[in-house]
Structures are given as structure tokens and as C-alpha cells.
Image (spheres, helix red, strand yellow):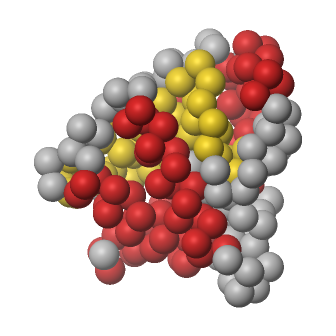
Amino acid sequence: MEIKVGQSVMELVEGDITRQDTEAIVNAANTSLLGGGGVDGAIHRAGGPKILEECRQIGGCPTGEARITTGGNLPARYVIHTVGPVYRDGLHREPELLASCYRESLKLATAKGLKSVAFPSISTGAYGYPLAEAAIIALRTVKTYLLEHPEIERVRFVLFGQAAYAAYAAALKEL
Ligand code: ADP
């Protein structure tokens, strides 16, 4: 499923982020940038040790910010590592921090002159962010960014499993 946003396209697919041929893929990392489970583990497994070496050099990333490395052995040329908020009750700046992850990741893509980026559903795995709420924030933030930055031609949300895809599809219809 895809929609036009200004001159750009926002797209939802069900699948595995490590297989995407966009110029960059985004990693749902943790503040250490030294790897973990979920998307993070999958990206480092598929991308090889080069990515972890670059992450080590960077030395960490605060919640809500993003850092960029090369893509190692991945089809994508770059990995943008962003750290989503751990969800507590929604009253600890989680919405603002989650929105910041999407925005800061896209700013790095713009700075590198990239035209296509794939995102996973940040914070909705180990970090416990409710899917429906996270989906609305993700889609709204990316849409706003694309309207101001037509140089990014395509943003793809890669949803892992049917439930995640359904949540994002419902949120996209609400947008
Ligand atoms: P976080 O710690 O930010 O919650 P996780 O990696 O635990 O990050 O989960 C984020 C989301 O990514 C979850 O919805 C999870 O199902 C999904 N996910 C896990 N593996 C992959 C993958 N290979 N590609 C895309 N999404 C994935």
C-alpha cells in the first residue's frame, strides 16, 4: 500500500528490513549502539562486522537522536541508527521522543543526499510502545517531513508480521 505525499511516496510493506534496497535502512538501536535483539540483531547479522566497528567509533547515541554508518554487506548503502524511547505510560515524553527518531533519521538522509529510506516500527518491540499509537506518530511525522523535503522521494515502512502491517494500514487511512 502506498500514498503520495507532495512529490514523494510513503509506502507500507510487510517484510524484513535487512532485505530492503532503499539507499538507507533505519535501525531501532539502543543507546550503546553496540547491538541487541530484534531489528538491531538482524541488521548486524546480515550486515556483518563493519557496521558494529563504525558504531563503536561513534560511541553511543541518546534517545531520540540518530547516527549514520555504512551498510556493510547489506543491499542498502547506509544504516541510520536511531534510539526509540522505552514506553512507560506515554507521559514521559515518549510521543515526542518517538517523533524525534523519525525526524532526525530523515535529516541525516537529507544531509547525505539520499532519496529513499526504509524504517522499521521503532520502539514497538522490546521497548513496548503500543503499535496503534506508534503507527500514527510514525506516519504523521514522516508525512510532515516529506511535505517540506521533496528531495526524499520514497519512505518505506517495513512491518514485521501481519499485526504490525494492519496497525500501520489503519493509521494511514486515518491520516
Ligand atoms: P525496539 O527496541 O525499538 O522496540 P525491536 O527491534 O525490539 O525494537 O522491535 C521493533 C519492531 O521491529 C517490532 O515491531 C519488531 O516486530 C520489528 N522487527 C523485528 N525484526 C525485524 C526485521 N528483521 N525487519 C523489520 N522489522 C523487524
Q: How many marks?
A: 0
Residue drawn at the location 45% of the way across and 73% of the way down: 136
Using residue 7 as the reference point, say whether residue 21 is left or right of it: right
Residue 7: give x, y in percent of width and height. Answer: 14, 48
Using residue 74 as the reference point, say whether residue 33 is left or right of it: right
**Residue 58 visible within the image:** yes
Q: Give the quarter of the figure containing the N terminus.
A: bottom left
Residue 70: give x, y in percent of width and height. Answer: 59, 19
- Identify which residue, 165 or 97, lies in the foreground: 97
Residue drawn at the location 36% of the way across and 45% of the way down: 155
Residue drawn at the location 47% of the way across and 54% of the way down: 103
Rendering quarter of residue 101: bottom right
Residue 98: give x, y in percent of width and height. Answer: 60, 65
**Residue 22 visible within the image:** no
Q: Give the quarter of the figure containing the C terminus.
A: bottom left
Residue drawn at the location 63% of the way across and 36% of the way down: 67
Rendering quarter of residue 123: bottom right
Residue 22: give x, y in percent of width and height. Answer: 41, 29
Quick check: 51 above or below 152? above
Quick check: 171 above or below 152? below
